[in-house]
Amino acid sequence: MPLPSLRSPRRLFADAVSPAPTRRGLLAGACACCAAGLLGPAGMAAANVPAAPERPLHGRLDEAARAVEARMIEWRRDIHQHPELGNQENRTAGIVAAHLKPLGYEVRERVAVTGVVATLRGGAGDGPVVALRADMDALPVAEEVDLPFASRARTQWGGEEVGVMHACGHDCHVAILMAAAEVLAAHRAELRGTIKLLFQPAEEGLPRGEVGGARRMLDEGAFEDPKPDAVFGLHVTNGWNAGTIGYRAGPAMASSDTFQITVQGRQTHGARPWDGVDPIVIGAQIVSALQTIQSRQVDAGDASVLTVGVFRGGNRHNIIPDRATMEGTLRTFDEKRREFMMRRVKEVAEGVAKAMDGSAEVVWSANGYATTVNDPALTERMAPSLARVTGTDRLRLTPRATGAEDFSFLAQRVPGLFFFVGVTPQGVDPRTTPTNHSPRFRVDEAGLLPGLRAMLHLAADYTGSGTA
């Protein structure tokens, strides 16, 4: 049962956290937790999927999951108290590797800086290779939750000293997969095929110039020897109560791309604007014109989001500066739309600036995330396994989320299924709880066991384990 101190207060928080201005741009992408707050009860439909029949192996896996639950919560609390940012997860990775090796896994460390890849070959015969993924990194957020295991950690990030917190629930993901690793190893003799575990760093993005995350793990061979036939991943969310699991076939989470626009004008005195070219006025026109791409140039039935979140220009009220800069994000659910929007942002910005006697340069970050697409056939096949775990009344179909996840790159290589696990206490309205990425984000640990059972059932059912 969850501790009373872990229950979220019944009050409304409007506290999706933005870093201080000097930290803007440190996170190259936005992870799923940015979408978690959008996954609340409104717009969430019952899946109406019949539960798959239960085999004796499922009962044994569930019994083992309940037996390891207390230790899983201890792991989660320890990791929560000692969070580490992307590409810095050395302690976490060390705990993971030390846990896996005695269980009989073939363990490869320092994949994509701090990642861990582990392989377990089943003893019940040939079968497919299934990958299970957990992300390990925390966020540059100072914790404001009153817990005995709250983080007080501080470290360097992008040249600044920052607080560090598992404000997104990746501590839960690591603990769940560590528990799954133990249960699967204990039932190795009954497993067919091969289990591959990916403990991934840097899902939350990195300071400019650093490379990491799922894409780098793939580049460094995480999906080789052997290559998985499918990959599964989960994310905890405050948007649902503990015991609820949600999923969506097809495009489930948006792509995420970051852009910077530099407008070049000509400096002059604020009292004599005609002697120069005002980049702030040009920039303001660009911001307005960019909004017409979505509102006037694309089908409104297929949404995308284009947001300018940073506008800098000048440092004195009576001086027109030489330049102004803007930064923003693009979210889409379709690669053609993504390419179109990126092209039009460049054309509009350059065209507006030229028409006003200035110039504009548009630079797109190379670290964008692709759309997370749940393979339709795999999703249809495995949904009854999730229904077996939750019961048909607690399995939900989610709307598309405009948050992003670099699980998307794993799902581009092999069929993937990414699903969400509720961690708001029963009886508490999720809409009143702090969202993922908030310094007041907290987890009802009763939600971890359904996540663990889901991973175990998916692995057993996909590999055909426990069948005659």
Image (cartoon, grey):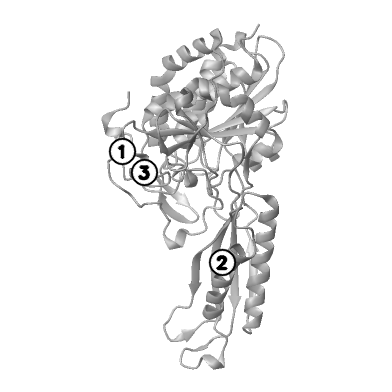
Mark 1 to mark 3: distance in Å?
A: 11 Å
Mark 1 to mark 2: distance in Å?
A: 37 Å
Mark 3: few/some/many CA within 10 Å (<14, 14-19, 20+): many
| Camera-side residue of 278 and 464 | 464
Residue placed at 54% from the left, 70% from the top?
Answer: 287
Q: Residue type at mark 1: give it.
A: Ser
Task: Give the secondary structure at mark 1.
Answer: loop
Q: Earlier in the sequence, mark 2 or mark 3?
A: 2
Frontmost of labels 1 and 2 is 2
Q: Which residue is mark 2?
A: 291
Image quarter where the C terminus lies is: top right
Q: Residue 96: where, in percent of width, then height? A: 52, 27
Q: Is residue 108 visible?
A: no
Quarter-wise, where is residue 440 in the image?
Answer: top left
Mark 2 to mark 3: distance in Å?
A: 29 Å
Is 466 located above or below residue 346 in the figure?
above
Q: Which residue is mark 1?
A: 8
Q: Residue 133: where, in percent of width, then height? A: 58, 31
Is 360 located above or below residue 250 in the figure?
below
